[in-house]
């Protein structure tokens, strides 16, 4: 007959497995050390530096001769000839819906002028550079560049689940991005929102609390391309515990049934 020690081992096994398990709430990311040793950066309402163009950035490029004279005419409804609007994303243009991509060497190939340095430049610097290059071909060119692939990553508080959210304009706020991502998950903690931004080659981390009215001021914080917004989820101990124990209990119950069958057949 199987002694009591065997049964005790069977019933203690789930507890031992849980105590030794590292799988409970393992999806929670970006944990800060206990004891307050981690220091968060001060929260900027607007980016400290202007966005600079990076490798693989995509953009639309518009060129209007004569300081944009024909652009004003098109807005006012005056007829515009096709050859007056160049390299744009316009129904009157042969370059309709064409995007340009910054190559791995930091340059982009553009019509007429060929390879042009783009990486590391702000939009205004890049536009000024293009004006100088196209001024040899066109009279007082007016140039506009729009980055089309700016985005940020939002973890809405559902464990490690995340969404890539496009940034449609340069003044998109934190609240708008959270809304586009579907809001804060029921498991998310509105008082622990970590925004991680690359500044001068490293990530600064800002802690934002939107759980009270005092946090309303931070809803207008301007989000920048490549920001990470992490809403920390609440630890779901009960659900994770059941998930960890269920396979073990299934095996133990099977073993227990087999043992009982063996005992009854003796």
Image (cartoon, rainbow, N blue to C red):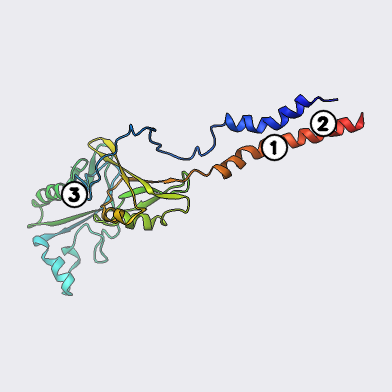
Residue 238 location, x and y as percent? 57, 44
Q: Residue at x 47, y 50 (%)?
A: 187
N-terminal label among 3 and 1:
3
Q: Pick whichever, 225 or 142, lies toward us.
A: 225
Q: Are marks 3 and 1 in contact (CB under 8 Å)?
A: no
Callout 3 secondary element: helix
Mark 3 or 1: in front is: 1
N-terminal label among 3 and 2:
3
Callout 2 secondary element: helix
Q: Residue at x 22, y 57 (%)?
A: 87
Distance from the alpha carbon under mark 3 to that under mark 2: 74 Å
Distance from the alpha carbon under mark 1 to that under mark 2: 15 Å
Q: Is residue 117 above or below residue 46?
A: above
Residue 63 location, x and y as percent? 17, 57
Left or right relative to 56: residue 137: left
Callout 1 secondary element: helix
Distance from the alpha carbon under mark 3 to that under mark 1: 60 Å
Residue 198 location, x and y as percent? 27, 40
Tell me the crowding category of disc 2: few under 14, some 14 to 19, or many 20 or more residues within 10 angstroms, Cα based: few
Q: Pick whichever, 165 or 239, lies toward us.
A: 239
Left or right relative to 138: residue 20: right
Tell me the crowding category of disc 3: few under 14, some 14 to 19, or many 20 or more residues within 10 angstroms, Cα based: some
Tell me the crowding category of disc 1: few under 14, some 14 to 19, or many 20 or more residues within 10 angstroms, Cα based: some
Q: Which residue is mark 3?
A: 123
Residue 227 appears in the rendering: no
Q: Which residue is mark 1?
A: 249
Residue 73 location, x and y as percent? 14, 70
N-terminal label among 1 and 2:
1
Left or right relative to 49: residue 210: right
Q: Which residue is mark 2?
A: 259
Q: Where's the C terminus, which quadrant?
A: top right
């Amino acid at each position: 007959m199987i002694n009591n020690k065997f049964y005790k081992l069977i019933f203690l096994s789930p507890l031992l497995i849980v105590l030794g398990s590292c799988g409970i709430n393992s999806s929670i990311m970006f944990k800060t050390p206990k004891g307050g040793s981690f220091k968060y950066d001060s929260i900027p309402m607007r980016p400290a530096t202007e966005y600079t163009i990076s490798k693989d950035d995509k953009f639309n490029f518009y060129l209007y001769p004569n300081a944009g004279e024909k652009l004003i005419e098109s807005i006012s409804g005056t007829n515009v000839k096709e050859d007056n609007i160049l390299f744009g994303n316009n129904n009157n243009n042969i370059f309709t819906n064409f995007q340009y991509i910054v190559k791995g060497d930091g340059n982009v190939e553009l019509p007429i002028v060929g390879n042009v340095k783009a990486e590391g430049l702000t939009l205004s610097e890049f536009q000024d550079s293009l004006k100088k290059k196209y001024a040899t071909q066109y009279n007082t060119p007016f140039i506009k560049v729009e980055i089309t692939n700016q985005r940020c990553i939002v973890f809405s508080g559902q464990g490690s689940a995340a969404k890539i959210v496009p940034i449609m304009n340069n003044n998109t706020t934190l609240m708008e991005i959270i809304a586009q991502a579907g809001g804060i998950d029921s498991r998310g903690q509105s008082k622990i929102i970590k925004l991680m931004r690359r500044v001068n080659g490293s990530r600064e981390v800002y802690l934002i609390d939107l759980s009270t009215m005092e946090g309303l001021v931070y809803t207008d914080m301007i989000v920048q391309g490549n920001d990470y917004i992490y809403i920390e989820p609440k630890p779901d101990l009960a659900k994770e515990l059941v998930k960890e124990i269920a396979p073990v209990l299934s095996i133990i119950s099977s073993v227990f049934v087999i043992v009982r069958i063996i005992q009854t057949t003796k």
